[in-house]
Image: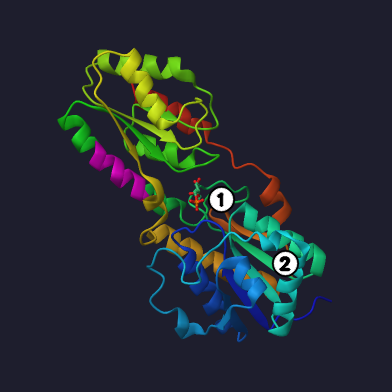
Amino acid sequence: MPKAIKKVAVLTSGGDSPGMNAAIRSVVRTCAYHDIECVGVYRGYEGLIEGDFKSMDARSVKGIINKGGTILKSARSKEFRTVEGRQKAFKQLTKAEIDGLVVVGGDGSFTGALIFNQEFDFPVMGIPGTIDNDIYGTSHTLGFDTALNTVVDAIDKIRDTASSHNRLFFVEVMGRDVGHIALNTGIAGGAEEILIPEEDLGLDRLVDSLNRSRKSGKTSSIVIVAEGDKIGKNIFELKDYVDENMEGYDVRVSVLGHMQRGGAPSCFDRVLASRMGVKAVESLLEGETNYMVGLLDNKVELTPLEKAIKGKSKINLELLRVSDIMST
Ligand code: F6P
């Protein structure tokens, strides 16, 4: 029989994403609803090691569902990667009489949670929070939808100035290892070409595509580049390449950067965070552990943490084809 859960801790870890506050709120309020205690842990695993905890009740999360970032702060902890660090964290949790932990973060944070469970048999539950949408076991991670809207808004603005000056813009979006943001926003923003890490498209294709666009009468172009794209050149090198090898282009570069991680979460992310928080706490109360809560076919489902960490969140090939057709 697993030990009854009477007190749950929640932390946010890794890169922040819009919707993390809504997830914290949901975890806290679900605990209150079930009459169990809830504790917020500051600065992710760093705060877990140091015992930087704060008791939270339903009212302590008022007014945060619409806020970007995370009120609990986030960190990437080197110490939690060591056995000594995890031992300290376990001592802090035991001292505070906490029986279960909800981790809102990405696959690195889930790896830490899984190892911690294996070492100390401590119940853990994951909520996927990252704008990159690079986690297996969920169609959407928290913050992805908001980031898409932020990026599309930026592309629309860049297009205004691109078309006024007949310019070619390379726009870099986030996505270290995956092209979900690039592919979706490229289609939504009407990009001429989208370069993503999953596809080695090569420079020739980019050049062909730009030439085709020009022949078809386009006077300005936008190329979306995921920061981890496989073409082998960074966005500034791409600009230099076009400057040196293609005549008649006035090229500019725009790196959107961390603004993509901020801002008020979209309605979709607020609802998703609320659903995931409920499922995470109720699953812990039902004696489940080592799962990630995810959205699959619009249902909130559990995926074993191990699978969520090892699995690949694949790019939608249909979107690639749609993007090709749309840039005709
Ligand atoms: O949140 C994910 C992500 O945005 C990646 O796409 C990006 O490479 C990374 O975070 C950068 O994060 P940081 O500046 O916090 O290291």
- Is the magenta region chiefly helix, strand or loop? helix
Per the image, is 258 magenta? no
Q: Residues within 10 Å of mark 2 (few under 14, many from 20)?
A: some
Numbered disc 2: secondary structure:
helix
The image quarter containing residue 114 is bottom right
The image quarter containing residue 226 is top left
Q: Label 1, label 2: how many angstroms apart (C-alpha)? A: 38 Å
- Residue, disc 1: 297
Task: Return the mark for residue 66.
Answer: none
The percent coordinates of residue 8 (x first, y second) are: 64, 78
Residue type highlighted by circle 2: Gly
Residue 73 lies, with reference to residue 326, above or below; the image says below
The percent coordinates of residue 70 (x first, y second) are: 47, 67
Task: Return the mark for residue 85.
Answer: 2
Is residue 306 visible to the viewer in this orientation of the structure?
A: yes
Q: Which residues are magenta?
A: 149-158
The percent coordinates of residue 215 (x first, y second) are: 26, 12
In depth, the one of 125 and 300 nearer the eye is 125
